Image (cartoon, grey):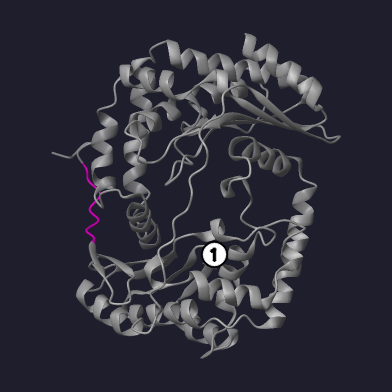
């Protein structure tokens, strides 16, 4: 007899050890897997950007692959490409893949990038200029400006309220010496989580990396301050620009991934505003029935992490439809808080979610990301294996309970970008809140 999706399990064994240098090592063996994947995650990321040097961590990560004390960029490419390898950097470290039998080569090169990156001056200047160009374009994009203002409303001056790539004021100030100092100070072993997945032996990986990282400075563990709690009351921000579309961002401070209501909120989201194929209530109403927009969504689980994310509902619509869109958002938020969801809605959301958990982690690259995620958030390494049964157990009553608790119309904030200014947008918002 074939198994139902609720009975299937994602098998992802994880062996956790500590290297002598202080780094945490996570290895998930997958016999027969054709690809090996690895991630060296450095805790902190853009949270460590000094004031006035926003974008530093991101630039340091991107440029880590541009050359080391042992190999320049072309030599690194010559080593990677014949073996189907690729490594990329970001504010939180480096991630790479290679054919499974060459996992030692992959890990050796990643260790080299983490500990020996040289940041050639010409490469720094070129990448900085490219970043300035992208930021200049983004500065003229209403959608980007609206999203930025929304995060400012939620997080204020906390690091979670700023963009990872920096600003037009900060990026031109970033110099090669800043990148070198950032990496020396922050890319240290005690902040590292190294995840590896493929057809390999965890003990062999440990021995290899223990030797490879033997001289890596341990450094100090970083403590990142959480954001302030949710501010009561409704607030508005607006970026006025003459465009044919109005971008609306509605929401408030959300939850941590460790919140015990995370799974029922995940299910609630897929009923309210994140379902497949526009089956969720908000998409069905605002997009299909009322024709207000093509892009519309809402969820609270997607940004939940070590610190609270956001509940966010977004729509891009015509300025003459802004009031109707906001009324629709508020009515659907209130309805899911006060009325039980239909059993067929709940069943559709749960069937989609249980299937997506299984299908979403077949690739080794996704698995290393999942291991790092679990380690950072203090989750059991088998949390993906148990997630389908947790989803299946969510009831109609659970959905209404968590919606009533975690969706708070009285604390919603609104950011708008488009042809409606702040006074008019505030009036529309007050009317929608008043019902």
Answer whether residue 66 is magenta in the image. Answer: no
Residues in magenta, as a range? 8-14
Residue underneath mark 1: 90
Image position of 71 (left or right of 307): right
Vertical comparison of 362 with 171: above or below = above
**Residue 256 makes an appearance in the image:** yes
Q: x, y percentage for residue 427? A: 75, 16
Residue 371 or residue 358, whichever sits in front: 371
Q: Quadrant of the N terminus?
A: top left
**Residue 5 makes an appearance in the image:** no
Q: Residue 399's quadrant in the figure? A: top left
Residue drawn at 22 percent across, 58 percent down: 13
Q: Residues within 10 Å of mark 1 (few under 14, many from 20)?
A: many
Seen as rendered, the residue at the extreme bottom is: 70
Residue 361 or residue 369, whichever sits in front: 369
Seen as rendered, the residue at the extreme right is: 242
């Amino acid at each position: 007899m074939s198994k139902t999706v609720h009975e299937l399990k994602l098998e992802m064994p994880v062996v956790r050890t500590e290297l002598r240098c202080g780094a945490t090592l996570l290895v998930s063996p997958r016999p027969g897997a054709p690809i090996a994947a690895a991630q060296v995650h450095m805790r902190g990321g853009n949270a460590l950007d000094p004031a006035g040097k926003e974008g530093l961590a991101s630039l340091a990560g991107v440029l880590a692959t541009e050359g080391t004390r042992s190999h320049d960029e072309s030599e690194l490419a010559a080593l990677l490409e014949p073996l189907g390898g690729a490594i990329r950097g970001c504010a939180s470290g480096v991630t790479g893949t290679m054919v499974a039998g060459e996992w030692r080569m992959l890990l050796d090169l990643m260790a080299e990038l983490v500990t020996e990156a040289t940041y050639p001056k010409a490469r720094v200047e070129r990448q900085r200029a490219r970043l300035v160009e992208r930021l200049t374009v983004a500065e003229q994009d209403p959608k980007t400006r609206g999203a930025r203002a929304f995060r400012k409303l939620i997080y204020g001056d906390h690091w979670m309220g700023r963009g990872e790539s920096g600003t037009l004021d900060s990026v031109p100030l970033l110099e090669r010496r800043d990148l070198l100092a950032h990496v020396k100070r922050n890319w240290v072993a005690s902040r590292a989580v190294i995840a590896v997945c493929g057809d390999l032996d965890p003990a062999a990986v440990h021995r290899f990396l223990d030797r490879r990282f033997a001289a890596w400075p341990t450094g100090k563990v970083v403590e990142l301050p959480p954001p302030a709690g949710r501010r009561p009351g409704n607030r508005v921000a607006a970026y006025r620009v003459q465009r044919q579309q109005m971008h609306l961002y509605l929401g408030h401070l959300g939850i941590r991934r460790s919140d015990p209501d995370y799974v029922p909120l995940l299910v609630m989201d897929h009923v309210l505003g994140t379902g497949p194929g526009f089956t969720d209530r908000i998409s069905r109403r605002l997009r299909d029935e009322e024709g207000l927009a093509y892009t519309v969504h809402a969820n609270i689980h997607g940004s939940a992490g070590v610190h609270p994310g956001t509940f966010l509902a977004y729509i891009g619509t015509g300025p003459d439809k802004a009031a109707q869109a906001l009324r629709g958002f508020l009515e659907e938020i209130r309805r899911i808080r006060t009325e039980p969801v239909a059993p067929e809605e709940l069943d559709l959301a749960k069937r989609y979610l249980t299937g997506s958990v299984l299908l979403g982690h077949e690739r080794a690259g996704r698995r290393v990301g999942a291991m790092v995620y679990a380690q950072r958030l203090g989750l059991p390494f088998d949390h993906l294996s148990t997630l389908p049964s947790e989803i299946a157990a969510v009831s109609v009553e659970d959905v209404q309970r968590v919606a009533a608790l975690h969706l708070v119309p009285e604390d919603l904030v609104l950011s708008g970008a488009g042809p409606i200014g702040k006074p008019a947008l505030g009036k529309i918002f007050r009317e929608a809140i008043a019902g």
